[in-house]
Image (spheres, rainbow, N blue to C red):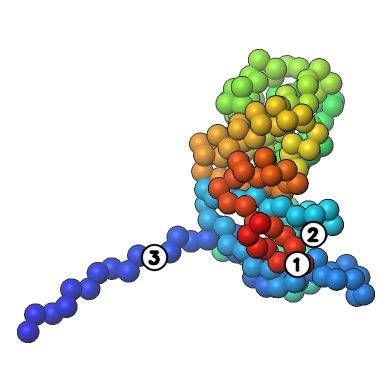
């Protein structure tokens, strides 16, 4: 009797980030910001999270980054349980594996554009001779290589946000966290910056979580979810 042919089972791709039953509230009498929240994110995925002000979007981002801790539940990033890491280990993880882009740009006014972008490499202790060339390459990829010697006060808002994107990706993180990155930009500039962000993410293979109030911004992502009553759901 012929034996049945067994086809190999396709394995699911390993999740880059898993949030398991996260709960968070800041006051006992207040409604929870996160109420058993679950999320799985794989490498290369671009997720937008929308929600009302005060819904907990920035809190969620801070918990993912290890800047805040959930009351219960687990954050698994690259198979590491962030709840088991001390503050020093979390700092090292953020520096090496996570990039950040914020609404307020957070470029340092006393550093040149090149120095701002090289900062993550400085913090990681990269070889000194590598820092400037890698920072210049990141600026070139973001279309502002000619501004390397300029200072933030000499740049437009859109140019400063491009600097922030270059800085966030210069050390090749596996995850980018963007909190309202176009909130200070006009609609046309915001569209340009988001287009650049998506382009650079696709080129690097990094996953990203975008927090935004703007549906136009959210539509640049691969998937949109809404944070409401402590849970993520389709918008």
Looking at the image, is 69 positioned above or below residue 145? below
Q: Which residue is mark 3?
A: 11
> Which quarter of the figure has residue 180?
top right
**Mark 2 neighbour class, 10 Å CA radius: few under 14, some 14 to 19, many 20 or more:** many
Residue at 53% across, 56% down: 42
Counting from the top left corner in percent of width and height, residue 107 is at 79, 32
* Local secondary structure at mark 2: loop
* Local secondary structure at mark 3: loop
> Which quarter of the figure has residue 71?
bottom right
The alpha-carbon separation of the residues under discs 1 and 3 comes to: 31 Å
From the image, state whether disc 1 or disc 3 is nearer to you. 1
Counting from the top left corner in percent of width and height, residue 185 is at 77, 31
37 relative position to 46: left or right? right
Q: Which residue is mark 2?
A: 56
> Which quarter of the figure has residue 118?
top right
Looking at the image, is 77 positioned above or below residue 159? below
The alpha-carbon separation of the residues under discs 2 and 1 comes to: 8 Å
Residue at 67% across, 40% down: 216
Marks 1 and 3 close (CB-CB < 8 Å): no
Quadrant assignment for the N terminus? bottom left
Q: Earlier in the sequence, mark 1 or mark 3?
A: 3
Marks 2 and 1 close (CB-CB < 8 Å): yes
Residue at 64% across, 35% down: 194
- Asked if residue 174 can be seen in this view, the reply is no
Quadrant assignment for the C terminus? bottom right
* Local secondary structure at mark 1: loop
Where residue 230 is drawn, which disc sits there? 1
The alpha-carbon separation of the residues under discs 2 and 3 comes to: 34 Å
């Amino acid at each position: 009797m012929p034996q049945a042919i067994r086809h190999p089972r396709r394995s699911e791709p390993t999740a880059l980030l898993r949030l398991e039953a996260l709960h968070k509230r800041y006051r006992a009498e207040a409604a929870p910001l996160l109420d058993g929240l679950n999320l799985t994110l794989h490498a290369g995925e671009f997720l937008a999270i929308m929600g009302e002000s005060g819904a907990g979007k920035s809190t969620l981002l801070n918990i993912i980054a290890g800047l805040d801790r959930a009351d219960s539940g687990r954050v698994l990033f690259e198979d590491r349980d962030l709840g088991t890491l001390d503050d020093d280990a979390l700092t090292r993880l953020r520096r090496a594996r996570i990039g950040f882009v914020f609404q307020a740009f957070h470029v340092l006014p006393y550093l040149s554009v090149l120095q701002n972008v090289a900062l993550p490499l400085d913090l990681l202790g990269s070889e000194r001779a590598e820092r400037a060339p890698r920072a210049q390459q990141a600026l070139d990829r973001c279309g502002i290589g000619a501004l390397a010697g300029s200072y933030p006060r000499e740049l437009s808002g859109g140019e400063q946000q491009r600097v922030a994107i270059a800085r966030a990706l210069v050390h090749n993180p596996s995850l980018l966290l963007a909190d309202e990155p176009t909130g200070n930009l006009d609609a046309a500039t915001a569209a340009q910056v988001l287009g650049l962000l998506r382009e650079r993410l696709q080129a690097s293979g990094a996953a990203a979580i975008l927090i935004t109030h703007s549906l136009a911004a959210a539509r640049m992502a691969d998937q949109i979810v809404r944070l409401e009553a402590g849970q993520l759901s389709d918008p």
